[in-house]
């Protein structure tokens, strides 16, 4: 990796420190944070310990003219730099070497989902733990951006801000029920994208209409007559058997008012999931609306790609111990949250066959 490829995008990040008191270059500190996080460090203290152990290695890439900075310096810098500049620098850096090509003309899925940083509770001027709403490019394993809010209920206001950060032309944006809002659907379409939105009780009338339509189809077994397309997938993993029955249909005439209310609404979907683990069996039914034409395999892939975000959350909690992190001052929790996501992105770009 050419060092200039790292320093160039990060040179645009404003250094919040007073010039006369600076003993360490900002780019040195940020490089330390990235490398140490890849190595499993989860806070300023561990980053400093790692930097001191590997000083000679780090000096192959950065100056470190005054040695490793203190953990107070790292914590202060990460709490003061602007999150939007920090994100943009990472986006530019990863874009310089990530493979954005889509194989075989497949659609580009962009799931949007939120995660709470439970350890951030108790920060000054923050009543609730920080909640990060993030967008991912699942095929490439890249995080595309995040917006921080003070509670999960504020996702509705965060999602439009996040959408403004993204290039959505040709993308299929998937969002869970919290983001199933008319204005959000409109914003996605106006930005050149399409949507697949989960529908639950927060859209009571819409959810009831979808439930009634698909229940009638199951009772009368007349799926073809209503243009329904169906697809079944089976997945075995860690002692669990999961079968998904996906059905998608054009918006029926009985839902004309719904079609007028939602920008470019073209199809409605249902996913029935049957899960078997040992002697225990469970089932779940979910409903969706979409601006895409009713293509059932594409619909199934969109839903499955959205659920795959849960594996990212698992990595953040289990590998990077995000929920246990006590980082909370200033913007440090948001910046470290984004740093962890980008380390995941970096690792997913590595195709080497190391031991």
Image (cartoon, rainbow, N blue to C red):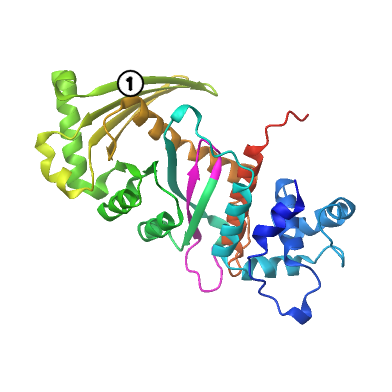
> Can residue 7 be seen by looking at this rendering?
yes
Which residue appears at 38% of the width and 43% of the height? 173
Give the residue furthest to the right.
56
Q: Secondary structure at mark 1?
A: strand
- Would you say 140 lies left or right of 203 here? right
Name the quadrant containing residue 295. Answer: top left
Can you say whether 117 is above or below 74 in the image? above
Tell me the quadrant of the picture where the N terminus can be found.
Answer: top right
Q: Position of residue 11 (x, y in %)?
A: 67, 64
- Residue located at (44% from left, 43% from top): 110
**Camera-side residue of 9 and 355:** 9
Instruction: Identify whether 156 is placed above or below 302.
Output: below
Q: In the displayed structure, does residue 23 sit left or right of residue 185?
A: right
Question: From where the camera sits, is residue 321 visible?
Answer: no
In the image, residue 261 above or below residue 283:
below
Quadrant in which residue 275 is drawn: top left
Residue 242 versus residue 286 in the image, above or below: above
Q: Which residue is mark 1?
A: 231
Query: x and y percent of residue 178 in the render?
Result: 34, 50
Residue stretch rendered in magenta on the structure: 121-142
- Residue 139 within the magenta-colored segment of the rendering: yes
Question: Which quadrant of the figure has residue 100?
Answer: top right
**Along the line of sight, the residue nearer the viewer: 279 or 123:** 123
Question: Residue 297: horizontal and vertical position, in percent?
Answer: 36, 25
Q: Front-most of 205 and 86? A: 86
Badge 1 crowding class, 10 Å Cα cut-off, few under 14, some 14 to 19, many 20 or more, is some
Residue 350 lies within the magenta run: no
Q: What percent of the width, then of the height, locates residue 181?
A: 28, 52
């Amino acid at each position: 990796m050419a060092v200039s490829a790292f320093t160039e995008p990060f040179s645009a990040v404003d250094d919040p420190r007073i010039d006369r008191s600076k003993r360490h270059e900002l780019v040195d500190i940020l490089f330390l944070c990235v490398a140490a996080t890849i190595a499993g460090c989860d806070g300023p203290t561990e980053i400093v310990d790692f930097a001191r152990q590997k000083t000679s290695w780090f000096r192959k890439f950065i100056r470190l003219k005054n040695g490793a900075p203190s953990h107070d310096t790292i914590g202060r810098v990460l709490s003061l730099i602007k999150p939007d500049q920090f994100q943009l620098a990472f986006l530019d850096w990863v874009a310089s070497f990530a493979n954005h090509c889509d194989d075989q003309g497949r659609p580009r899925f962009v799931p949007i989902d939120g995660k709470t940083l439970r350890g951030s509770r108790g920060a000054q001027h923050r009543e609730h733990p920080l909640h990060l709403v993030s967008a991912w490019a699942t095929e490439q394993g890249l995080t595309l951006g995040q917006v921080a809010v003070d509670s999960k209920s504020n996702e509705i206001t965060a999602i439009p801000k996040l959408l403004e950060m993204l290039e959505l032309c040709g993308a299929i944006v998937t969002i869970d029920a919290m983001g199933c809002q008319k204005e959000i659907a409109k914003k996605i379409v106006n930005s050149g994208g399409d949507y697949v939105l989960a529908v639950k009780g927060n859209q009571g009338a819409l959810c009831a209409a979808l439930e009634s339509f698909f229940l009638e189809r199951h009772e009368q077994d007349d799926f073809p007559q209503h243009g329904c397309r169906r697809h079944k997938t089976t997945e075995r993993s860690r002692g669990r058997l999961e079968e998904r029955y996906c059905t998608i249909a054009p918006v029926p005439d009985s839902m004309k008012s719904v079609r007028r209310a939602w920008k470019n609404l073209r199809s409605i979907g249902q996913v029935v999931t049957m899960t078997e683990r040992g002697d225990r069996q469970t089932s779940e039914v979910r409903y969706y609306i979409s601006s895409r034409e009713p293509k059932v395999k594409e619909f199934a892939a969109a839903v499955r790609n959205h659920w795959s975000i849960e594996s990212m959350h698992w990595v953040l909690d289990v590998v990077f111990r995000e929920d246990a992190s006590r980082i909370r001052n200033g913007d440090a929790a948001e910046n470290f949250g984004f740093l962890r996501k980008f380390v995941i992105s970096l690792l997913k770009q590595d195709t080497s066959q190391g031991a």
